[in-house]
Amino acid sequence: MNVTISCGGIADKETLHARIAAALDFPDWYGHNLDALMDCLTDLDETAVTLTGWRELGFPADGFWQVFRQAATENPDLTVIFE
């Protein structure tokens, strides 16, 4: 699966969590926090995620990008591309 998530213009972490969850079809139990994000990302099968506009967020989101990078190292089926 190839997924592109547009992050530009998002003003808060709740909206970013919601956009990620919708794009990756996370389960209902997704807790909208970084621990839950890590759990869901490391459970993905053969997925390439391209994050666009990630530098244009209206809030600091370094924790999100660290989770994506860490999940990609722990899950060999996950590829993360920052554009």
Image: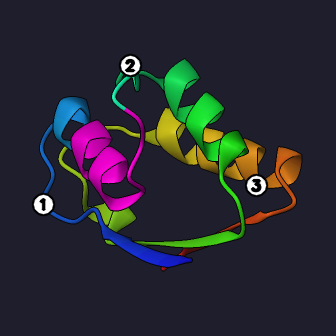
> What whole-number distance in Å separates the C-alpha atoms at marks 3 and 1?
25 Å
Disc 1 + disc 2, Cβ < 8 Å: no
The answer to which image quadrant residue 60 occupies is top left
At 70% across and 60% down in the image, what residue appears?
45
Residue 13, horizontal then vertical, whole percent? 25, 33
**Three-letter code, disc 2:** Gly
* Camera-nearest label, 3 or 2: 2
Q: Tell me the tag on residue 37.
A: none
> On the image, numbered disc 1 is attached to which residue?
9
Residue 32, horizontal then vertical, whole percent? 35, 25
Q: Which region is colored magenta?
A: 16-27
**Three-letter code, disc 1:** Gly
Q: How many marks?
A: 3
Question: In this image, 47 relative to 30: left or right?
Answer: right
| Residue closest to the eye, 53 or 40 | 40
Q: Is residue 25 magenta?
A: yes
The color scheme shown is rainbow
Q: Tell me the tag on residue 31.
A: 2
Q: Secondary structure at mark 3?
A: helix
Q: Is residue 61 above or below residue 81?
A: above
| Residue closest to the eye, 81 or 31 | 31
At 12% across and 43% down in the image, what residue appears?
11
Label the magenta part by its dominant secondary structure.
Answer: helix
Q: Secondary structure at mark 2?
A: loop
> On the image, numbered disc 3 is attached to which residue?
72
Between discs 3 and 1, the one toward the N terminus: 1
> What whole-number distance in Å separates the C-alpha atoms at marks 3 and 2?
20 Å
The N terminus is located in which quarter? Answer: bottom right
* Camera-nearest label, 1 or 2: 2
At 55% across and 48% down in the image, what residue appears?
65
Disc 3 + disc 2, Cβ < 8 Å: no
Question: In this image, 47 relative to 3: left or right?
Answer: right
